[in-house]
Amino acid sequence: MTTLLPTAFTVAEINYWAILPVLIVFGGALIGVLVDAFAPRSSRHSIQVALALLTIAASFGALVWKAVDNKGATLDGAMIIDGPALFMQGSVLLLSFLSVLLMAEKFSSAGADAFTPMGAAVPGSPLEAAATRAGWGTSEVFPLALFSVAGMMIFPAAGDLLVMFVALEVLSLPLYLLTGLARRRRLLSQEAALKYFLLGSFSSAFFLFGSALLFGYAGSVKFSALSQAITTAPADVEGLLLPGVLLVLVGLLFKVGAVPFHQWTPDVYQGAPSPITGFMAACTKLAAFGAILRLAYTGIDADRWDWRMGVAAIAALTMIVGSVLSVTQTDIKRLLAYSSVAHAGFILVGVLAFDATGVSGVMFYVLAYGLATIAAFGIVALVREGSAEASHIAQWSGLGKRHPVVAGIFALLLLTFAGIPLTSGFTAKFAAFAPAIAHGGTTLAVLVVIGVLCSLVTAFVYVRVIVLMYFSEAQGEVRALNPSVLTTVGLAVAVILTVALGVFPAPVLDLANQASQFIR
Amino acid sequence: MTNPYVPLLFFLAIGGGFAIFSVAIAPLTGPKRYNRAKMDAYECGIQPSPQAEGGGRVPIKYFLTAMLFIIFDVESVFLYPFAVAFGGLGLFALVEMVLFILTVFVAYAYVWRRGGLDWD
């Protein structure tokens, strides 16, 4: 009889400097849970905000100070800290820092913040009303967001399918909860959370089943072993490869919201509290594209001639459906949701280039898109009619006259989404499309043409909103709330970086280029 | 022993034999007095009929209990193989396990402080 288990375990080599940024975020999240357990209710919110910001800053410090010099595979290859992983982790930290600033907004008047006073109370119940009167807030959002950030940092650095799956769950589970915590329109928010959870678990199951098939094919969950197995091509289990690859890709494409796995996007973006929507749209997309790059470039790249056409078709569909459906939207958050679907398609084109320049283009794109998205949803949270967010587009008419700064920033962000030259959106599209044309052959050239046409369609949508804000008469009592210092700083940094990435993209592009080499 | 699966066959036979023997012997030897409880489904949870008050709803509070149970269930799932293999693992594994248990207790402290253990 053979023994299945080795008699002695070899302890995996751990490079603690390389994973220190992730450990710091996990530690901060755990302390955050304890703060929520023991700190008095009155000071919880401020402690949580300070703790979350400190944690993210410390993690970023550890990343820049130590992790960049400790590249390589660690934890027996379970995590691979290389250029793309570090770039993605740094970007996640930057974007989540800005998101936390926006989540912390309380607008100096009671009940104006984005989060429900008591998530466990039934919407409209006396319990909820009592919690509102008492002025409670959901300070759990900050530890939850930190847990999610930790998952997002592991996601693009995962060295095998299992770690990638665990990271996927760690980043998703807090997001499902956060989605259901909106203060206003509670039922819509809870419905969104449930939809997100059900469809998310569905896609996780796809990912897991695909992983099982790939494990059967390669005899290991590691990307390096998978890549090796594809080159040696074991004939007897060959049939497991393509279904496995496709199922795993379905799981990941769900997270970026690619058509036909995008159905959750508009509902969830609309139902979630606006700062959470921004966080989710920016950071999840970034982390998920990091994971897709890792899988596509280091795991299943040798097999790409089998699945590339499928993903190309998905990219084309994503761009077309996302941009065409954004034309018909009347809710500003749903509009931004469909625009994010279209953007996912644009980014997929860059992924398919299969070249280091494609990697850096994608990384630049997700960073630029993330900054603009966080700022856009920050603005959406400001514009109110009564106490509710003015979500219908018609309510935004004439905003340019009443609130020129808010409308001006939003117009700039919309132009960025549209990819007008001199904005970061243009640089990003160029960085993603140029490698696709240079290295992708006819297929990708066709995709780029589709991408440019779809950009035109979405540009029409954005310009329509701008026209509405500046050239229509104001209706109703729509006003923009005065943001506190934190939000002002968050919005200002996001907008300034968006402008800077458009006008002087070279430093970040260089950084992305230097960081574009995967370690296998 | 020629085949390592022979003991397994014995095990199967003894297990099956015990079940059949128990079921067969009970009607022969047991007293037969009527009792309402004997008409119920055996160890199958909540009675399906008659329908309970409020449409047979279960209080949502059980949900929290179930969640707490899962937390500590997962902990014990990890603790068993750890305890079995501890001899070969050394100090590193001990530190890791202490960290893991501490993490679980963070969740426990949160639930305790926020009133998750109060039934009403």
Image (cartoon, coloured by chain):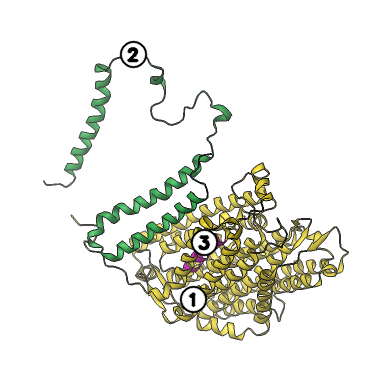
Chain colours: A yellow, B green
Q: Which sits in the foreground, B115 or A86?
A: B115
In this picture, which residue range is highlighted in magenta?
A142-154
| Residue A263, percent from left and from top | 62, 55
Q: Chain of mark 1?
A: A
Task: Name the residue beneath numbered marker 2.
Answer: B33
The amino acid type found where label 3 is placed reads Gly
Task: Name the residue beneath numbered marker 1.
Answer: A86
Which-is-in-front pick, marks 1 and 2? 2
Residues at marks 3 and 1 touching, judged by CB atoms closer than 8 Å = no
| Residue B14, percent from left and from top | 20, 34
In this rendering, would A340 be left or right of A163? right
Numbered-mark total: 3
Residues packed near mark 2 inside 10 Å, few (<14), some (14 to 19) or many (20 plus): few
Residues at marks 2 and 3 touching, judged by CB atoms closer than 8 Å = no
The amino acid type found where label 2 is placed reads Arg
Residues at marks 1 and 2 touching, judged by CB atoms closer than 8 Å = no
- Helix, strand or loop at mark 3: helix
Residue A192 falls within the magenta-colored stretch: no
Q: Chain of mark 2?
A: B
Which-is-in-front pick, marks 2 and 3? 3
Q: Residue at x 33, y 13 (%)?
A: B33
Residue B33 in the image: above or below residue B74: above
Q: Chain of mark 3?
A: A
What mark, if any, has residue A209 been given in the picture?
Answer: none
